[in-house]
Image (cartoon, rainbow, N blue to C red):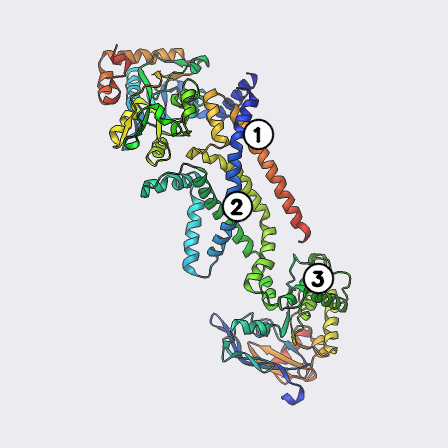
Amino acid sequence: MTQETRPGTPVLELRNIEKSFSGSTVLRDISVTVNRGNVVSIIGPSGSGKSTLLRCASFLETADGGDILYDGEYAMQGGRYADKDMLWNFRSRFGLVFQNFNLFPHYSVLKNISEPPTLRGVSKAEAEEKARLLLGKMGLSGRENAYPYQLSGGQQQRVAIARALALEPEILYFDEPTSALDPELTGEVLKVIRQLADEKMTMVIVTHEMAFARAVSEWVVFMDGGVIVEEGPPDLVLQNPEMERTRQFLTNYEK
Amino acid sequence: MSFFSMMLKMSEGLSKTCAIFFLTLLFSLPLGMLVALMRMSRNRFISTVTRGIISVLRGTPLMLQLLAVTYGPYYLFGFSVSRNKLIPVVIAFAINYAAYFAEIYRGGIESIPKGQYEAAQVLGYSRLRTFLRIILPQVVKRIMPSITNEVVTLVKDTSIAFTVSYQEMFTIGKQIANSQTSFLPFVVAGIFYFAFNAIVDFGMGRVEKRLNYYR
Amino acid sequence: MNLKKLTGLILILVMVLSLSACSSADKGGTKKKFIMGIDPEYPPFSYMDDQGAYTGFDVEVCKAVCDELGWELEVFGVNWDQKLVQLDANECDCVWSGMTILDSMKEAGYVISKPYFYNSQVLLVKEDSGIASSSDLAGKDVAVQLGTSGEALLNEDLADLAATFGNVVTCDSFLKCFTELAGNAVDAVFVDLPVALSYTKENAGYTIIDEELGAEEYGIAFRSGDKELCSQVDDAIQKLVKNGTYKKIADKYPDIVDNLIFLNQ
């Protein structure tokens, strides 16, 4: 359970993150390191703070204390965030895939994917070419001109993944990427994520899909009540958890 | 006076009715957005004051506001009353309609899911870009039916301008009705308003249709 | 003509439906109710006093007439440019409010009382305006109240004069006409002499151009079927003139005494 078991340089370091919402503590002294090429899954009951952790790492929530480092550079130090322009630069290093996709409904699939890179200086032609490439990779060739409402949930989520990838992030966050999907549609999304894992994409996945977490990740973090209860390789945490709380959660989950 | 000479005379006032209509929309649509943003401001003072102003504008008759704008400056400060009544009429109408539009905009903006802002933020859209490119187009589509309602009401409200003797179509109609002791000018006015609104309805329907490329 | 009748019919239908409550006047047993239609902004004939009650020369005379005939008086503020429509719709039993008798009213069949007041139209201007006659108003703006005989005059008998004005601004009340003048939005107000007299008395800085532009008489208008009602009122007024009540009321309104027909015969 030390760094040595996960070789590589850290892309994301979260140190002693604290967060409370109007008095109630949501995250308490959370530290997580994600190394290049690793897939880390965060599991735990709802309300355990796992989504909040991702949202803090992607600056959607403001953590109250702690450090956030990307590639060893401070995006937040001692509870103080870097300035606006620097945060904007930091945002290009990660991508976030939401539970509800959050595609822009008035944009075509192609524009959803190709517009964000143009905000960072990529030419429109280049961005569109890249978008087509990514759509092909997602198995969605030919849907460039469709609008999100014309796609199934699974297809929409794959567009959302392509949109995140278009910015060439160093790390990709997934916030319960299959929770809003009908069961028969989760497979196509998980397949895409697995494919990315095979390509050594660095990823943090908040998920309830235990079998998937076990298959795809190098490291599993179990959170409950705003703290990390247990973490380690999936075979250990998911098969032979040390902590009673983890065991309880996994048993309940299998029911 | 024949029916047609009546129509001819009243259609002279129609251009003034149109002037009220178009100028009011021209000023109140953007002004309403400004008011909506002030109403939603995080600054408590600005939002409370704006809210108070909106409730006064929506809670008092447009006719009173028109009188206040036209004659208020004279009674309060001794300023001259404007000879060109189009100015106070458009000011009063634009302010009044801005208040209504502001509440429609606010409803529309608040109905956009938080996720749209979050996705835009993560993808590197600035706050202004998020508003202009992501939020506003969706708001426009959602509020179109309410805007159409207000625009139709505006067509009919233009007749209120007669309170300050602005010679729009309805004022002329009243004068003819009076001098001819006839109800006919009001029938003509009704026909004009109905036709005007039919055109507005058609135009707004076209706009709504064009926005229907997504859901 | 047919269209006119039809629209009249529609109007009356709508009015009668929405105001059917007004027909209680002829109920037996109780005191007869007489509804007097006035322009509530027409001093000194009819206006609202400081306490918010309707008063004025016409209102007081009507009250005396009702007392004489044992009727109950109700005063009803009409929309002046719609007064005859409202009369037709039974919203009131008469229009009695410094109303100029027009030929068109008689032609339309309304029953008109004996004229009781000589009137003329005058131009009210600011003292410092330098305007001394109607010809000085060439190119200038003149306000007139919608539905008054002044407005009718400018459209018909005085159309040539009106054509020399810059604009004729028709307001829906005298207050607005005077406000337009006070606020320099117009240069003159074309108005009935007594109204102009009482305005200049209460407000400094105004003067009346010494030029009578239209001679006319005031009367009371009744619906076409109400000949009997009209003569009842006419007779009652004559009684009041004889017993001195009329004079007593008139003395409270010195601006108009000189033009009252019954006191100057």
x then y, percent, for residue B127: 55, 63
Q: Which mark is residue B152?
A: none
Which quarter of the figure is the C terminus of chain C placed in?
top left
Read off the chain for label 3. A
Within-10-Å neighbours for mark 2: few <14, some 14–19, many 20+? few
x then y, percent, for residue A105: 65, 58
Q: Quadrant of residue B151?
A: top right
Within-10-Å neighbours for mark 3: few <14, some 14–19, many 20+? many
**SS class of the residue under badge 1?**
helix
x then y, percent, for residue B110: 54, 56
Cα separation between marks 1 and 3? 49 Å
Labels 2 and 1 in the same subunit = yes
Type of the residue with mark 2: Leu
Q: Are marks 2 and 1 in contact (CB under 8 Å)?
A: no
- In the rendered image, which residue does mark 1 sit on? B191
**SS class of the residue under badge 2?**
helix
Cα separation between marks 2 and 3? 34 Å
